Image (cartoon, helix red, strand yellow):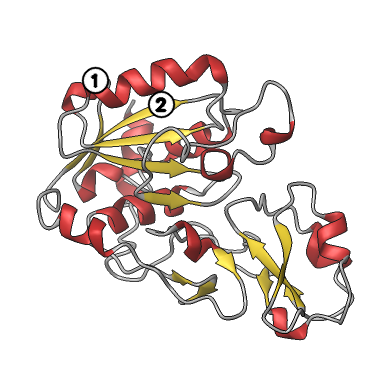
Amino acid sequence: MKNWTLKGLAAGKVTTKWPASGENDGQDKVLGFPTFHPQDCRPACRECILKCPTRAFSTKTGVNDEESVALDYGRCINCQICVASCPTTALQSSSNLTFASKSRQDLVVDEGVNSRENDELRSRVSSIFKGSLHVRHVDAGSCNGCESELQALCNPFYNLHRLGIFFTPSPRFADVLLVTGPVVPQMKGPLLRTYEAMPRPRFVIAGGTCPISGAPFDMGYSGGSGLEIHLPVDISIPGCPPTPAAFIHGLLLLTDRINQRLHGGGYEQ
């Protein structure tokens, strides 16, 4: 015990001050989501569509019958296959990992799409939960990757409690329902009962690619199609899994304590 105490005193405070001071968010040198520049695509090239295992890429026909390619971060698992197969510089690797969105449309990189930030959410949240926020987490069929990242929120580095955010075992004390997993059929009933047990006002966060879109498990008989067809989603946090910093960003975005970084699929530092 004496040695551990001495080591702790020598190490000092290990908790990051991020995002208050712009310090390290713990994701240095971690490969982020691919950045996509549709205007740099080669005409008629569909390599990304053919290679993507989760159908994150799709085509759209414009007013002049011209096809364009769109990338949906809500279906992206950050596997980087698209970057490796792209014959141009339209798709590139990045370090962009820490972001969430109030609008599902803002997760789509598409030419001509503007931000559609959820002003209704801003008015609903107001300043009610800026002091403290209680979260009830439901695993709706996750592979447990997201759960591993959620556990890290309470370690000494992230120390979620410093931000006034707490996990609660009871939905009756929860302000936010945080859902991971694609919502498999066996978890639909427990999920809806948890939501109904929450007091109003209540908010829903889709934590990870699975609850946002169901990908990549929406292609199997035992998978799910995501959270949006069951409950209204206020915040979407893309990632497979999202990093602890991304979860924090989503929770702070809900309470309007941090700015949204993703607008129309474009990332802002």
Q: What element carries label 2?
A: strand
Q: What element carries label 1?
A: loop
Mark 1 surroundings within 10 Å by alpha-carbon count, few (fewer than 14), some (14 through 19), many (20 or more): some
Q: In this view, does 116 lie to the left or right of 38?
A: left
Q: What residue type is labelled 1?
A: Ser
Mark 2 surroundings within 10 Å by alpha-carbon count, few (fewer than 14), some (14 through 19), many (20 or more): many
Point out the tag, 1 or 2, that comes first from the N-terminus.
Answer: 2
**Residue at the image position 76 percent from the left and 59 percent from the top:** 80
Q: For the N terminus, which image quadrant?
A: top left
Q: What residue type is labelled 2?
A: Val
Is there any visible trace of residue 17 in the rendered image? yes
According to the image, label 2 marks what residue? 138
Residue 238 spot, x, y in % from top left: 53, 52
Residue 263 spot, x, y in % from top left: 46, 72
Q: How far apart are marks 1 and 2 (CA)?
A: 11 Å
Q: Is residue 164 above or below residue 100?
A: above
Checking the image for residue 170, the label placed there is 1
In depth, the one of 47 and 150 nearer the eye is: 47
In depth, the one of 127 and 23 nearer the eye is: 127
**Residue at the image position 57 percent from the left and 64 percent from the top:** 108
Quadrant position of residue 56: bottom right
**Residue at the image position 26 percent from the left and 64 percent from the top:** 119
Quadrant position of residue 2: top left
